[in-house]
Image: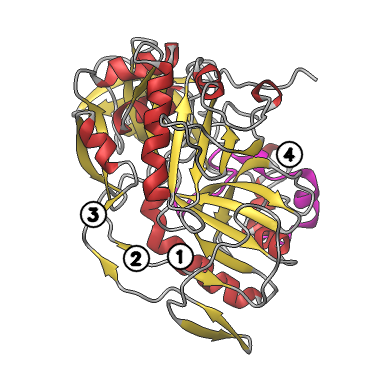
Amino acid sequence: MKSGLATAAVRAAPRALTRARLGTSSSSSSSSSSSSTPFAAAATPAVGLARRNGQVRFASGAGATADLKKTPLYDVHLAHGAKMVPFAGHSMPVQYAGASLADSHHFTRNHASLFDVSHMVQHIFKGKDAAAFLERVTPSGWATQANMASKLTTFLWPGTGGIVDDSVITRIGEDEYYVVTNGACFEKDTKYLDEELGKFGGSVEWTRLDGSGLVALQGPQAADVLKEVLASDVNLDALYFGNAVWADLKLADGSKTHPVLISRGGYTGEDGFEISFNGKLYPALETTGPAVEALLKAAGPERLQLAGLGARDSLRLEAGMCLYGNDLDDSTTPVEAGLSWVIPKERRAAGGFHGAEVIIPQLTPKSKGGAGVDRRRVGFVVEGAPARDGAEVAKDGQTVGKITSGVPSPTLGKNIAMGYVKDGLHKAGTELDVVVRGRKRKGVVTKMPFVQTRYHKSNA
């Protein structure tokens, strides 16, 4: 983990909250492949057929619907007094009765919280050419990725190197990868992946796990809580940040869930886990809710509470993590975004990924003879009123950047923000003007994360 960004971070859906999404699952393949993982048998309905490079493959087919979708935890949210809002095409909880956003924020930092992140899109890519395909559309290395290990990456546009979406990818088998993308990028990502697979033409099968559940258990007591509901022999102490494991969970009635994928990481800067309930193989709509209720019952309200989108946003910003659609977009390259660390040494040397002709020269600063970048993502502490997305950043009356995210920090008691400034003004301690509601406020460039992260890492 580098630059204060979690490998399983940079991952909430964009601010476009009500975009309609396709209501079907899609699969893209040129040949089938086998796997021994619990995701292996995931079957995908034949939504439509498309012929690419002489091969017949499944493609997304049904039209979009404007109706908000419900996650497997919708009834749980209502039962616990959630205030629901439209988000990424879903009805999602922003907060819960009896707890302010700041209350939920502090509770996560001191105890543990459960977040419904089922609006995120889960995929499986498998086949002998799956790694090669992923190495074409992202700048990361996948052929050498360890099994049951996760890392952050970015899908890229050819030619420009702009970020299509950010994603966490886990290798779950010899030729099988579990991919999580942003819910509000659903339509764009579906079209992008469908077209890129068609142009690639190799042996790759793509399954989208529609109807699946995904929950994030976050906070310093997360591991202790999870241990109490594990029905499998799993040593969580040896499961480090960026690693994953299959396990069953105990339900309150004494039964067990189907195998779930537990990944250590998250989007808050705290220790925690993301737990995937595969809706293709199992009845995720029926098991996700009981599993969450079992966690809440085992922990008790003094250790574990439900939390919503509001607290999730302030937690991720304190941890210096990006929000796609605000801090990352189609026009931003990984270098500009401070995500150069997702590009390993061997990929910098060999290239071969979309936008490499733009991105690789940017890795060398202008001062050292490279192309460098004209802008950089930075953190700010802002005096006075909090700066929000779109606020102008100026120096000596000239615009030099803009704010992309901003909140009052419950932990620090200060207004924090993230944004982009001209290269050369990105050094910590640089004082700039941030225009908030028509008034100039002092903004000091600050290193991120604003609050120290507390991931469970190996000392080896």
* Circle 3 or circle 4, nearest the eye: 3
Residue at the front extreme?
254
Residue 68's disc is 3
Q: Mark 2 or mark 4: name the one nearer the start of the chain.
A: 2
* Residue occupying the point 76% across, 55% down: 174
Q: Position of residue 454 (x, y in %)?
A: 57, 17
Q: Quick one: SS at disc 4? A: helix
- Above-or-below relation of 51 to 209: below
Q: Nearer the viewer, mark 1 or mark 4?
A: 1
User: Can I make out residue 430 in this image?
Assistant: no
Mark 3 or 1, which is nearer the eye?
3
Q: Which residue appears at 36% of the width and 25% of the height?
A: 314
Amino acid at pointer 1: Thr
Q: Amino acid at mark 3?
A: Leu
Give the spatial CA distance, label 2 vs label 4.
47 Å
Q: How is the image coloured?
A: secondary structure
| Residue situated in front as seen by the camera: 208 or 233 | 233
Q: What residue is shown with label 2? A: 22
- Sequence order check: which comes first, mark 1 or mark 4? 1
> Looking at the picture, does residue 21 appear above or below residue 57?
above
Check disc 1 and report its element: helix, strand or loop. Answer: helix
Task: Measure how far apart labels 1 and 4 are at the Cα level.
Answer: 39 Å
Tell me where residue 443 appears, x and y as whole percent. Answer: 37, 20
Q: Which residue is mark 1?
A: 190
Of callouts 1 and 2, which one flags the residue occurring earlier in the amino acid sequence?
A: 2
Q: Are marks 1 and 2 in contact (CB under 8 Å)?
A: yes
Residue 224: within the magenta? no
- The answer to whether the residues at label 1 and label 4 have Cβ atoms under 8 Å apart is no
